[in-house]
Image (cartoon, rainbow, N blue to C red):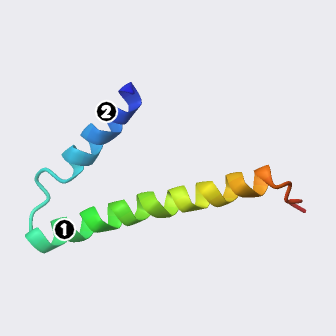
Amino acid sequence: MKKLVLVREIYLEAFRNLGHFIIEKYFKAFAWFSFVMFFVVLYAFVYRLATGFAFD
């Protein structure tokens, strides 16, 4: 739980004094998109491990 709070603080600090409104919204959307894509890749990898996919 402590690591989750640390990641949250890093996320909030990264966008605190960023500047222009559009740039701030763009980077927030890009960060969330990156998080989602990372978890999709992680899910696909775990699914392949669970189903016995041969990594040749």
Quarter location, residue 41: bottom right
Residue at x 86% of width, y 54% of height: 52
Q: Residues within 10 Å of mark 2 (few under 14, many from 20)?
A: few
Q: Quadrant of residue 13?
A: top left
Viewer-proximal residue among 34 and 20: 34
Q: On the rendered structure, is 38 left or right of 34?
A: right
Q: Position of residue 4 (x, y in %)?
A: 37, 35
* Residue appearing at x 55%, y 61% in the figure: 40
Considering the numbered disc 2 on the image, is that residue within a helix, a strand or a loop? helix
Q: In the depicted view, which residue is nearer to us: 18 or 44? A: 44
Q: Position of residue 43 (x, y in %)?
A: 61, 56
Q: Are marks 2 and 1 in contact (CB under 8 Å)?
A: no
With respect to residue 41, does 49 lie above or below? above
- Number of numbered discs overlaid on the protein picture: 2
Crowdedness near tag 1: few (<14), some (14–19) or many (≥20) residues, C-alpha within 10 Å: few
Residue carrying label 1: 25
Residue found at the very far front of the displayed protein: 51
Position of residue 17 relative to residue 2, above or below, is below
Q: Which mark is residue 54?
A: none
Left or right: 31 in relation to 26: right
Type of amino acid at the residue the image marks with label 1 = Lys
Upstream in sequence: badge 2 or badge 1:
2
Q: Which residue is mark 2?
A: 5
Image quadrant where residue 44 sits: bottom right
Residue 50 location in percent, x, y?
A: 77, 50
Quarter the N terminus occupies:
top left
Can you name the residue that lies furthest to the top here?
2
Secondary structure of the residue carrying tag 1 is helix
Q: Amino acid at mark 2?
A: Val
Where is the C terminus found, in terms of image quarters?
bottom right
Residue at left offset 31%, top offset 32%: 5
At a point 78% along the width and 51% down the height, the residue shown is: 49
